[in-house]
Amino acid sequence: MKAHRSVQWGLTCTVAALCSLASGPSAQILAQKSGVTGRITLSSAPPEPKIVRITSDRKACGSQVLVSPIEGENGGLKNAVVRIVGMKDQSPADFPEPVMDQLGCLFEPRVVLVAPGQQLDVLNSDGTTHNVHTTSKANPGVNKTMPKFLTKIMLRFAEPEVIPVRCDVHAWMHGVIVVAEHRYYAVTLSDGSFTLPSLPDGVYTLEAWHPELGARETTFKVSGGVAAGVHIVF
Ligand SMILES: [Cu+2]
């Protein structure tokens, strides 16, 4: 991940009354249970989807496919990968049931998180032939044809890496498999929001990386179990 210069959106606690409220015991318990939440936003509206006209395979793909490499709702940026940089806690991640489907001739989700060694289910829900083709450096490559009768394959990647995946049958199909270094990773939802596991008090560097937009960083503080300023704008 290429790191760009940091953009700092500090919302550190400056009002004494608010600080004491936010850092009280109940706030700490809440923060520990709910994790660190934040948001990645776009400074302008996302571009319109690209329209791919389908000339063959219409039964599976329809007459056209809308491809949205950059998307989001309500000012948010979807499918950004956020992580804590330089995390000392290297305890392994265990993301909930990573799945990447091939649905409507698109990878869904477009970006998926998996831990080293964790099983990733790659599905084919389209009733047509797809081809899962990764471009890896740290892990062995995958180039697996999935005819319509092969509705699921299971993949595992040993090494942390950002792995582009494409389908050689449908040239517009692009996705990313992120093999995380540790458990402090998340992928943003449509509104740009994300939740990371709770963090001990301290100052942290947050990176947001998007396949089309690159990487940006910010720093934020966790104080009394409460995180503030967990926000990056692209
Ligand atoms: Cu395909």
Image (spheres, helix red, strand yellow):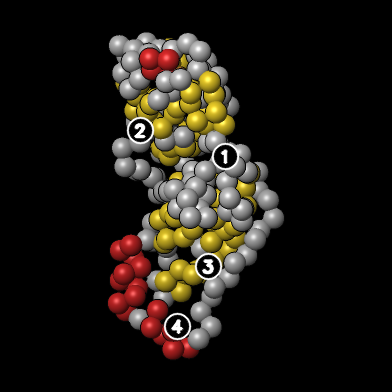
How far apart, in angstroms, are the residues tagged by discs 2 and 4? 40 Å
Check disc 3 and give the amino acid type.
Gly
Asked whether disc 1 touches disc 3, contact meaning CB atoms under 8 Å apart, the reply is no
Note whether residue 81 is visible.
no
Residue at the disc numbered 1: 48
**Relative to the observer, which residue lies in front, 13 or 94?**
13
If you read the primary sequence from the N terminus, does the residue marked by circle 1 or circle 3 appear first? Answer: 1
Give the CA distance from mark 2 to mark 3.
Answer: 31 Å
Please tell me how crowded label 3 is: few (under 14), some (14-19), or many (20+) other residues with Cα within 10 Å.
Answer: some
Residue 184 placement (x, y as % from top left): 44, 52
Q: CA distance from mark 3 to mark 4?
A: 14 Å
- Where is residue 140 shown, x and y percent of the image? 50, 21
Instruction: Tell me which residue sits at (30%, 77%) in the image.
Output: 26
C-alpha span from label 4 to label 1: 42 Å
Residue 202 to residue 59: above or below: below
Whether residue 9 is visible, yes or no, is yes
Which of marks 3 and 2 precedes in the sequence? 2
- The residue singled out by tag 4 in the image is 19
Is the residue 27 above or below the residue 188 in the image? below
* Disc 1 from disc 3: Cα separation: 30 Å
Check disc 4 and give the amino acid type: Cys
Q: Which mark is residue 99?
A: 2
Which type of secondary structure does the marked residue at label 1 adopt?
Answer: loop
SS label for mark 4:
helix
At a point 55% along the width and 36% down the height, the residue shown is: 49
Residue under circle 3?
229
Image position, residue 201 (x, y; %): 45, 70
Residue type at tag 2: Val
